[in-house]
Amino acid sequence: MSRPLHRLLQGPVSSLALALVALPLAAQAPTRQGVKAFQVARVQAEALALRAGLGLGERDAFAPRASFLNGQGQTIVHLDQTYLGHRVLGSGMLARVQPDGGIRTQAQRPQAGIALPDAPRLKAESALAAAMRRLDPKGPLKGQPKVELVVFPARLVGGVATVEDPATHRPILDRKNVVHAQVAGDYTWAYEVKLRVQNPKDGHQERTYYVDGDTGEMLRIVNDLASAAALSGVTPATASAQGYYRGPVTLATTQMLDGTYSLWDTTRGTQPNPDLSYFSDDGSGWAPTGLQVWYNSHEADGTPTYSMYLFQANPTNTWGDGQPWSLGWGQENGPNGQTAGVDAMSAMATTWDFYFNVFGRKGMDGLDTGVYANVLATGGYMDSATDNAWWSQNAQSLTLGAGSYPANPRGFRSLTDLDIVAHEMTHGVAGSTSQLINDREEGGLSEGTSDFFAQMVKVYANRAPGDPIDAIPGAGADWQIGQNVGHGTPLRWMDLPSRDGRSVDAWYDGLSHLDGHFSAGVLTRALYLLAMGGSSTQGAVNHSPYNPAGFTGIGLDATARIWFKAVTENLYSGWSGSITFVEARDAAVAAAEDLYGIGSGPVESVRQAFSAVNVGLATGQAPRVGVAFAPWRDGDWVMGDKYDPDYWSKVEYLPLGEKVRPRISVTNTTDPRVTWRLGGPSVFGYTGSETGPEVGGVINADGSWTTPFNRGWHAITGSSVADPTQFAEGRAFLVNLDTDQDLENDALDMGGIAFSWYLSNGLNFSHSMFNAPWVDDADVAAYIDAVKNTWLPK
């Protein structure tokens, strides 16, 4: 019997001996069966011909990134905008080649007016070193770093990374990933550096860093956690298995050269997994293809060894005992540990088959690339892996925590249930098409897409004998995510997301402050209503105050086909976080028109469903009252309009202990009044989170806000008096201007403010520019604005 196939989680690359991997400037577009190279070439030529109309010049071009054939016989081609052959971050074009040869194109945020020198001053090696300093790994990297020169729009500066506190499940600031950079113009050369680390000291982290190609400053940080090989004589097999969640199942497994079996399905995924390709056959006949399940190993006391093994060396091909993981550390490859592997493998195969049978998609990337799961994970960055799950787009893999329940009553069971696995694998579909990321409103679209298709996979898995294999049944959705891992309590509801006390049911101004898992409620409720219809009965789960008359749903299958087409064909972010819910609604309308015809019932139902979550209007609806915090930035040099204007233009700096009036606008009504309340949806009813806002102060009878004596971020919400369903959440950073500390902001404070302005340790803690909200950034504008709000002009 051969020894179990094994790999160290930290991988083969030492942090002291890094190899630079330069990506090609214009790689050949990967294609699926049925896509002809000449079609991709025609699309590229068509895109180049459109440059003048888009305001682009001879230095601008479009390079194909991916292509596939959809169910309507159309060839879909994704192209990236390039400048001097280098990708422009977040900009591109989608093209659709009709069966008759006609081409329809759709530009995605084209970036005109780029004027940069032929090359940056900084070398790629220096950018890699800057990213390594930010990551600050305590152990070796996992895999090779990847470095690519790109054009970076200044508006994308930011991307503060957060991590989850394992004790409270709240986001807290990852301080080494705070960004506080400045860009002189609208664009700059930047190096995109992708780093991965997984070892005992660092846990598992995957980051993308954007380093200014001229100054070496860190511009943006993104948290990335959402050739065929011969089989060497191994034999496909069929196993009897017992899962905890899945019960008795039949699995595709593999008989190795020594006659034993492994949890390796060679029938799905003919192309090698990019992460497993770092490793070679150990003599067992293994190859980096197919679906595979690996497990984290531990010492008998539960300490992670940070090694990972394939479930292998099973002599009988009978897997699992059907019992929940009992934390029998050191026995992961025994029957109880195998149970988690059985659940994962069954869920992976079901999800794979769903996408192939219903949508014709081979694998998550559409290229038939193998996927592997890492189960019984613990530890990780801040011990976040135990009760968590995530997808790695770089590795085409999912990590599924062992769960800490019942030892930890607030924890979860093993994260290997079907809807968790399907959720994570769906991130791989979006990651290889629209490239959505958990940032701003786009975060809700990313997480909501995964929640919705996880629900569709569950319905598909429970279809009755005789149901068609290429369609989603019309009934059977429970509209819940993670009920089993939450031992009876779902992680999220999709029909009425606000049940969890965190998620929201409809769009509002300020939604960008909310984590994508909770703003996802806007999308999941819209898709729920699109499928099931809206009720005119107040109090019904599917009643909406934004569309109170109700409307007819179109069913699960049609809803899924519309949203799949929208995500894979009509939306493109390029990891920029720029897509809004309005853009998503428009993409869904276009998808419905393609599938069912312009003016058809499903098209109107899409408008009705998104209208019911306050995104756009149904046909004939009168404009709604709008409430928004007014853009008020004055073009200051730190946070001017070019830096993420949708977010920063509405952030206010206010003084402590003063009566202030936050700036808000109400439209489409003759009554501009608002009622104020402290806090907002993003506060989740708690205060004091390290990065979250706090609640404090007093709302006065005249509608003003007397701010508290509590420096830091605060949230406040204004609702329309004319239509209380319309509201906006704003953020303010409270600054202490009381230099002489007499509890009054007066003229005597001005001298002290001026005196201590640039001191590293000011007379008053919050006066020092080095204590501004951007950590070490001298944000003069913040204090100027706070002064303006203290002594308003006459």
Image: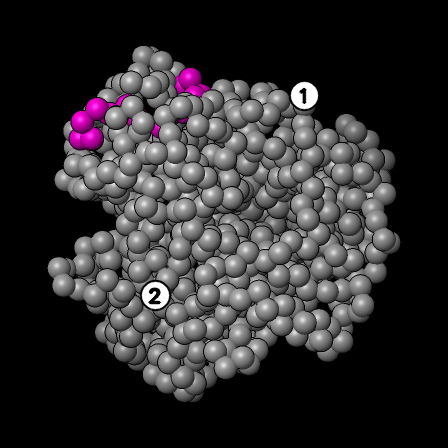
Disc 2 is placed on an element classified as helix
- Disc 2 to disc 1, how far (Cα)? 48 Å
Quadrant position of residue 774: top right
Q: Give the residue displayed 53% in from the left and 26% down from the top.
A: 11
Quadrant position of residue 788: bottom right
* Left or right: 35, with 254 as reference point: right
Q: Quadrant of the C terminus?
A: bottom right
Q: Position of residue 44 (x, y in %)?
A: 65, 68
* Numbered circle sitting on residue 16: 1
Q: Is residue 658 above or below residue 194?
A: below
* Numbered circle sitting on residue 677: none
Nearest the eye: 187 or 338: 338
Q: Give the residue displayed 64% in from the left and 39% down from the top.
A: 146
The residue to which callout 2 is attached is: 560
Q: Position of residue 311 (x, y in %)?
A: 31, 28
Q: Give the residue displayed 39% in from the left and 37% down from the top.
A: 231
Q: Position of residue 307 (x, y in %)?
A: 43, 21
* Residue 132 visible in the picture: yes
* Residue 91 visible in the picture: no
Q: Amino acid at mark 1?
A: Leu
Q: Is residue 285 above or below residue 448?
A: above
Tally of numbered discs: 2
> Which residue reaches farthest top?
300
Which stretch did the figure color magenta? Answer: 304-319
* Left or right: 175, with 465 as reference point: right
> Which residue reaches farthest front?
233
Nearest the eye: 231 or 377: 231
- Identify the mark nearer the N-term, 2 or 1: 1
